[in-house]
Image (spheres, grey):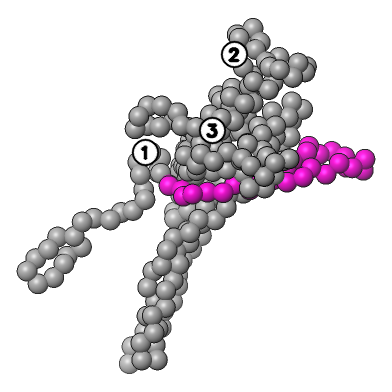
């Protein structure tokens, strides 16, 4: 009788040929946070009125708290993030002592980020103002428009809601985009405290931000939608061929 036991004969060379370009590094990523219009406008107006040591206009006359600056800052100051997991619920249907497991509803986890705190406090100020507009500190009221608050690609106009958008780009070792995740309808749930201590040396302040997420989409390096590879099945007279 022939020996049918499985034997794995895989060398380090076989492994190397399957680990494309040496693998993906967790340090090679970029995060962009697009703030809703109501936060950008409120933030710019307040900076102009405060009269602090930050130049609200500069030589160019452009607000230093502009949307472009805040988004650009996020690409440098967000030091840690996560790529999303996928969660689909399970429904167990009983039948004669057994349980048929069928798919339930999809849910989306909160998005976690860690942010460096620089001396102008621009990012933290903007995120704190975002949270305050949603729910004021001294009144139990807040903003009630739940649209995206950013550009509406259908009508070509900006909406007035408090939800923004987040992007995480996974990069290769040469800085080229391998994959991008878009988090739609985000807003800050939790802004972590910053510890102050005379005994802490050789470190930069940082804080965590937890974001609510309505849903996310993943795109490949060609920027095409990769939500599903579904192909409409072809029918013949007896069966469906996928």
The answer, for residue 32, to whether it is visible in the render is: no
Which residue is the site of mark 3? 36
Q: Nearer the viewer, residue 148 or 142?
A: 142
Mark 3 or mark 2, which is nearer the start of the sequence? 3
Label 2 and label 3: CA atoms lie apart by: 18 Å
Residue 87 horizontal side relative to residue 73, left or right: left
For residue 204: magenta?
Answer: yes
Label 1 and label 2: CA atoms lie apart by: 34 Å
Q: How many marks?
A: 3
Residue 62: image tag = 2
Which residue is the site of mark 1? 222
Mark 1 or mark 3, which is nearer the start of the sequence? 3
Highlighted range, magenta: 192-218
Placement of 1 over or under 10, stated as above or below: below
Q: Secondary structure at mark 1?
A: loop
| Residue farthest along the left direction in this orientation | 237
Q: Nearer the viewer, residue 133 or 199?
A: 133
Q: Nearer the viewer, residue 64 or 168?
A: 64
Q: Please rate how many residues cluster around mark 3, counting C-alpha atoms within 10 Å: few if below 14, some from 14 to 19, many from 20.
A: many
- Residue at the image point whose x is 64% and y is 26% from the top: 43
Q: Nearer the viewer, mark 2 or mark 3?
A: 3
Return the x and y of residue 169 as percentages of the image width and height. Answer: 51, 40
Return the x and y of residue 40 as percentages of the image width and height. Answer: 58, 27
Return the x and y of residue 73 as percentages of the image width and height. Answer: 62, 29
């Amino acid at each position: 009788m022939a020996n049918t036991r499985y034997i794995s004969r895989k060398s380090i060379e076989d492994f190397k040929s399957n680990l494309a370009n040496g693998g993906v590094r967790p340090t090679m990523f970029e995060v962009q946070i697009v703030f809703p219009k109501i936060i950008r406008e409120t933030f710019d107006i307040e900076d102009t009125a405060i009269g602090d040591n930050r130049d609200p206009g500069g030589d160019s006359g452009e607000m230093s708290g502009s949307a472009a600056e805040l988004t650009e800052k996020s690409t440098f100051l967000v030091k840690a993030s996560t790529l999303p997991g996928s969660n689909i619920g399970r429904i167990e249907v009983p039948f004669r002592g057994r349980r048929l497991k069928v798919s339930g509803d999809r849910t989306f986890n909160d998005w976690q980020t860690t942010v460096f705190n620089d001396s102008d406090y621009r990012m933290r100020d903007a995120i704190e103002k975002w949270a305050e507009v949603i729910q004021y500190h001294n009144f139990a009221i807040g903003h009630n428009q739940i649209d995206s608050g950013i550009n509406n690609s259908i009508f070509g106009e900006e909406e007035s809601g408090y939800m923004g958008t987040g992007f995480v780009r996974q990069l290769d070792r040469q800085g080229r985009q391998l994959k991008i995740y878009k988090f739609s309808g985000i807003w800050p749930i939790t802004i972590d405290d910053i510890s102050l201590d005379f005994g802490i040396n050789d470190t930069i302040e940082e804080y965590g931000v937890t974001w609510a997420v309505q849903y996310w989409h993943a795109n490949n390096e060609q920027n095409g939608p990769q939500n599903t590879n579904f192909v409409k099945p072809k029918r013949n007279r007896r069966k469906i061929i996928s």
